[in-house]
Image (spheres, coloured by chain):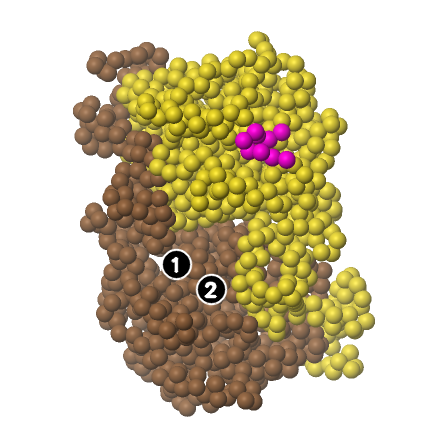
Chain colours: A yellow, B brown
């Protein structure tokens, strides 16, 4: 199959709505339209869920990936009147890593992407266009209202609250001191952004964006990494992965391309993405200097930041905390420095015997960030790459530095989140969260896993899914996914899906454990469908309806099995749920007709039984 | 492929030792031979790991599944002189669920299993042959010595301890009050069994057994369920699953067959199993009464217990805690009763309006258990089947009853473990462990997951692997696996493997977090292999070398890639581990040659740097 065919196939595949699902839009006070996904059940009830999939799953949307998505944010940004269009930086062949003799191929590639070119905007002189700046001015932006509606959309919230209350607070959750409100309001969102406890990554040049928030008092989010490397992958594949990733629930996507054509790949990705896009600009900067870390300069890095900010990247991972005085702390580690960015900068620092230029130019970088509203993701370049190196001095020295830089960024009203590990045994996970809260002033934490053991390459979505669920519960705002290919190779389409579903599980388990209002509504709806043998509803309410249904089909493929009161696990005679229902039916024949009366009836039967003595047989006819 | 071909293929496949692995035997004082697996690395070092795979992975072992495994325990049992051979119960056609007209097929099937028939043994009159009884008499049995050597076999223990100590107790672990010794001795094993804090499931009729212990102060164990159902599966498939399951690390296997031929299936499984086999006898008893729960009687159940005890089943799950007075507590649940055994007994109780006959005959049952040394696995018939039902009164009322029954069993010196849930959100997991410890007097806890969310059918190995790792850390002694097919269908070969690897991850992550001595040795060895680009060692040290290697092969199939200093994730220019090594090499050129000096050298460089002022550029030539 050649590339265009492959692309065509992908567009066909991923534009289908998920089974039994339809797109609904909630309209806000500012005229904005916020999407949600409604899952219809066979009993007539509907469950609404947070929807990251963008216009792709809306059958009414007209999409051409060569032109990019519609730009709903353009009007909001124009209305604020504090930005200006300008003639952007002229792209170089080197932006795509092209060398002599390769420019023809590149020209062809760029021609394909011609429809994706936009004139960049930036803040007018003296203006600061960050969401944090607006929030601190007391302004509720359209982005903030969008976030409030989106987070708040679960109409089941109040009902769920009442049900939980009826269950005697058993299920109330433990949020470890988070301040989750019962109802999300635009004002709450504004306040969280103003105090730095949440960010809304939203570059003014990413007008295709459906805004979302990352913060401890919001739903736990997940990030999926895509991107080519020098060894494998193509542009079409990366766009395919983007659309595929958001279909299954990625809240943000990082483009970690390190090979050729990374500028043009990024045009494709940003213009077709309804979710925030993050990058690690040092990767591209290193390509520009031919892969020689020592040749990096602040000027080349700065040029790369502007290049990417103009394209609309929403957050930058910068390894500003990899300071020269910390590098020796890694010398006796089992796995040294495992962050790519961290190792590049460590090499630069050692070679020049000089402080990290990202650290020394941090304030200058803030000027760029606030001109486009790019958020910082302060990278943990010294994160542990094995359980043995977890929570060591190198890691925590860097974390404290990130806390200092957070305050620098906040002085510029620049949004910040903090990256975290990595590889951490279970008993050492909570310390990561408490240290981060202590030193980083409640800026959102964004962790990679952590992996709880090192012995399962091929299954590191699972070793890390365990740690991700736990640290999400403790307060991490966004979890960076890990796929089964971690440590072994580049993830393909199925790996991306497996990684995302695993991390949706971790994030949701964390929301439930934190007691996030309404988080349990979907669990309860699915459990009820399960108990009532509504098989199709059970599949449709799940994170991956296709897999659930396919697994069921393997042993019971007939349509009639989808309403059968058993499955192949136990067979018809042994189904506990069927028997329980028979028990309830049977009890009803004794004269009780509703759930409450059934409970009372069964209780009075038991009491009579106890009164008459537990060992005495009582014929049913006399009972 | 017909059935015999399939069986032949499976024997071929699973007799291969794992890559780079060889079987070693440690000889004990009592002349016993305890297996372990040694993984050889390319640098000449070896890592030894706990080995559940039995003789199957020993190239020198001669095995014919139609004759069963060798019987090393026979001599130990004979030597104790407290048992007698006798003419066992005569098997009925009904034991295999056969009805009129089906006996010919059954006869053919039984003829195949003729080589697996053994004359049963039982305790002489007045004797008690349970490991707990011996332990309480102060006797260290061969089984106990076997367990001590097996648990203790990691020769890396002491070395690891010293390394951890050097890392300033960062990695010391938190065992939540467990009493894990630095070195396992036979006397420690005896003491743990005597006080009921550990069990050694070891029916005297299971002489093929390689003994193992289940207890909070031993390595966390995992169980894999196999078994046919009325809908699908065959005997050959079940034996295949057994050998496959122990290859990947199942410490015990439960045969949950509920369809036809369950007696004969069990002969095949027990005779070919080096690991303890557990069953749920009520399933077979129900088959004997044609699936009509109301027709069950104590006599039929008792007959089934003896039938299975004679075959050599090592532990019985019995739902003795599903008491009549508790059933009404499930009436308002979202998912009622989800345990098969629990629902069968609830139906019986309600139909007869009578107390559960397993509860009322519990002491009589103890007489059977101690005559064969069958351990109790006290089933949680009222476990929650959804997060909404977690930790409710039905569940905890039953748990308290299991605690009472534990003390009854212990009066008979009968070994006991306690089953636990199920479906439990993360914040409610620890309460399960603390309540179990409180009410069940430290009898080992044996949980199914728990699943931390209900919304991911198709991925319940992961939703439950999260909960399993956590509850294992808190103190659960054995984790019952969950496969991707949970709630949807019967697991096939690949599902069994996925479930086991997931649970090996959970159990190992728990051991590491508890600070189990030496548990981290394998993590560290693998991390070192990873850092040194010893790809084959990394694969071979992993829980699933085949998958790790296959994933790597997908993008870099050449043999030369297995020694390459990069992988396809980042490509050659971006490999952080390669760059870190270059940093270390580079630092060495500055005049430092070993790790310690390197650290000091890098530190002095940083100090000089700080002294000279962080902003001043220092040319390398002058440094």
Query: Residue shown at 52%/79% (left/top)?
Result: B260
Query: Residue shown at 47%/44% (left/top)?
Result: A493
Quadrant where the image shows the C terminus of chain A: bottom right
Q: CA distance from mark 1 to mark 2?
A: 30 Å
Chain of the residue under label 1: B
- For the residue pair A103 and A533, the one nearer the viewer reads as A103
Visible residue check, residue A447: no
Count neighbours of disc 2 (C-alpha within 10 A) and say few if under 14, some if 14 to 19, many if 20 or more. Answer: some
The image shows residue A23 at horizontal and vertical percentages of 68, 41
- For the residue pair A55 and A280, the one nearer the viewer reads as A55
- Check disc 2 and report its element: helix, strand or loop: loop
The image shows residue A302 at horizontal and vertical percentages of 43, 17
- For the residue pair A621 and A139, the one nearer the viewer reads as A139
Q: Which residue is mark 2?
A: B492
The image shows residue B299 at horizontal and vertical percentages of 57, 85
Q: Which tag is nearer the camera, tag 1 or tag 2?
A: 2
């Amino acid at each position: 199959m050649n590339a265009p065919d492959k692309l065509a196939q992908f567009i066909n595949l991923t534009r289908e709505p998920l089974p039994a699902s339809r797109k609904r839009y909630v309209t806000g006070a500012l005229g904005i339209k916020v999407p949600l996904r409604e899952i219809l059940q066979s009993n007539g009830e509907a469950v609404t869920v947070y929807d990251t999939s963008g216009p792709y799953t809306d059958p009414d949307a007209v999409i051409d990936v060569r032109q990019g998505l519609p730009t709903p944010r353009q009007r909001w940004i124009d209305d604020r009147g504090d930005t200006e269009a300008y003639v952007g930086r002229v792209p170089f062949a080197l932006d795509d890593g092209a060398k002599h003799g390769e420019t023809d191929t590149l020209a062809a590639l760029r021609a394909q992407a011609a429809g994706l070119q936009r004139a960049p905007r930036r803040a007018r002189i003296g203006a600061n266009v960050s969401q944090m700046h607006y929030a601190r001015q007391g302004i509720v932006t359209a982005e903030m209202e969008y976030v409030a509606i989106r987070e708040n959309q679960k109409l089941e919230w109040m009902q769920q609250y009442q049900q939980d209350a009826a269950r005697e607070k058993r299920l109330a959750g433990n949020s470890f001191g988070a301040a989750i409100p019962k109802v999300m309001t635009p004002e709450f969102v504004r306040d969280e952004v103003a105090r730095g406890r949440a960010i809304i990554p939203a570059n003014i040049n990413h007008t295709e964006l459906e805004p979302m928030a990352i913060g401890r008092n919001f739903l736990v989010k997940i990030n999926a990494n895509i991107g080519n490397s020098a060894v494998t992958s193509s542009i079409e594949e990366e766009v395919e992965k983007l659309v595929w990733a958001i279909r299954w629930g990625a809240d943000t996507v990082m483009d970690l391309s390190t090979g050729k054509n990374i500028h043009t790949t990024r045009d494709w990705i940003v213009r077709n993405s309804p979710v925030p896009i993050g990058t690690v600009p040092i990767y591209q900067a290193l390509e520009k200097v031919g892969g020689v870390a020592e040749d990096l300069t602040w000027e080349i890095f700065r040029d790369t930041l502007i290049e990417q900010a103009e394209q609309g990247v929403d957050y930058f991972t910068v390894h500003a905390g990899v300071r020269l005085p910390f590098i020796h702390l890694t010398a006796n580690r089992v796995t040294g420095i495992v962050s790519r960015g961290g190792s590049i900068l460590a090499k630069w620092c050692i070679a020049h015997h000089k402080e990290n230029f990202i650290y020394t130019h941090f304030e200058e970088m803030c000027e760029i960030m606030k001109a486009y509203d790019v958020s910082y993701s302060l990278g943990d370049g010294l994160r542990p790459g094995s359980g043995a190196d977890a929570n060591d001095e190198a890691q925590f020295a860097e974390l404290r530095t990130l806390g200092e830089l957070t305050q620098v960024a906040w002085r510029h009203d620049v949004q910040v989140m903090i990256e975290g590990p990595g590889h951490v045994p279970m008993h050492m996970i909570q310390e990561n969260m408490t240290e981060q809260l202590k030193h980083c002033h409640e800026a959102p934490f964004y962790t990679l896993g952590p992996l709880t053991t090192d012995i399962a390459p091929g299954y590191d979505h699972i070793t890390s899914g365990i740690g991700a669920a736990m640290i999400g519960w403790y307060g991490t705002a966004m979890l960076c996914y890990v796929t089964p290919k971690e440590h072994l190779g580049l993830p393909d389409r199925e790996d991306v899906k497996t990684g995302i579903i695993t991390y949706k599980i971790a994030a949701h388990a964390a929301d439930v454990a934190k007691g996030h209002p309404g988080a349990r509504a979907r669990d309860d709806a699915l459990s009820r469908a399960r108990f009532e043998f509504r098989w199709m509803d059970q599949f449709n309410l799940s994170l991956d309806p296709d897999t659930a249904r396919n697994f069921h089909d393997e042993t019971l493929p007939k349509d009639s099995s989808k309403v059968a009161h058993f499955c192949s696990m136990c067979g018809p005679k042994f189904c506990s749920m069927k028997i329980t229902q028979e028990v309830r039916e049977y009890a009803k024949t004794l004269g009780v007709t509703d759930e409450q009366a059934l409970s009372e009836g069964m209780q009075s039967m038991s009491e009579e039984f106890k009164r008459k003595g537990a060992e005495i047989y009582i014929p049913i006819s006399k009972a």
